[in-house]
Image (spheres, rainbow, N blue to C red):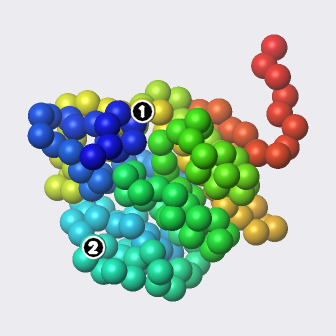
Amino acid sequence: MNKGIGGHVPATPGERSDDWITPREIIDALGPFDLDPAASASQPWPTAARMISPPDDGRLAGLWTGRVWLNPPYSDVEPWLERLADHGNGIALIFARTETKWFQRVVFGRASAILFVAGRITFYRPDGTVPKSTAGGPSALVAYDGFLRRNAKSLFDVGNGRIRGRYIEPGARQSRPR
């Protein structure tokens, strides 16, 4: 079992799960989305027009269409991000595990844009209640785009207002803070 920021830290003793709901304000700021292939079986609000949840075994391998929202199981992020990068149209919410090989390869190596979220996000339980604590680590919103760059633009726009954070484009020359 993962410890620390490999998975969500329990809000209460014994509460360890990959089943945490994205705050509605993040979906509202970035949406709408056509598909959420990693939705919870019980969602207090929609994250996309079409949501696929367990026990559907085709969530990762099935047909992904349109603009995708992805809050993947944090215990197994890499294959989900690989799939989103291959799909090329969507935004993922993940822990900012910049030291990992998968982050170096699939995020820095393939993403159109990243918004490192300021502070820690408070995720929700599937029943819509708020746990006593925030996420167990820093978060990043990661955009994957084709040439239109709609998802990168969404991150840039919210990074300057509705969701506080630091916006970067991997591979682009970044200005140094003064």
Q: Secondary structure at mark 2?
A: loop
Q: Quadrant of residue 117?
A: top right
Task: Measuring from the top left, give residue 118's x and y in whole percent.
Answer: 53, 29
Percent x, y of residue 15: 16, 43
Question: Which residue is at a point 57% across and 70% down the rendered structure image?
Answer: 83
Whichever of labels 1 and 2 marks the residue nearer the N terminus, that label is: 2
**Relative to residue 126, is residue 124 depicted above or below?**
above
Distance in Å between CA atoms under marks 1 and 2: 25 Å
Q: 76 or 84: which is nearer to us?
A: 76
25 or 1, nearer to the observer: 1
Q: Which mark is residue 137?
A: 1
Image position, residue 140 (x, y; %): 54, 42
Splitting the image into 4 quarters, where does residue 4 fall? Answer: top left
Residue 48, label in figure? none
Q: Quadrant of residue 82?
A: bottom right
The residue furthest right is 173
Residue 54 place in picture, x, y as percent: 27, 73
Q: Which residue sits at x=24%, y=60%?
A: 44
Determine crowd level at label 1: few under 14, some 14-19, many 20+ residues with C-alpha closer than 10 A: some
Identify residue type, mark 2.
Pro
Residue reaching furthest to the top: 178
Q: Which mark is residue 54?
A: 2
Instruction: Report helix, strand or loop for mark 1.
Output: loop
In the image, 36: left or right of 154?
Answer: left
Report if residue 108 is visible in the image. Answer: yes
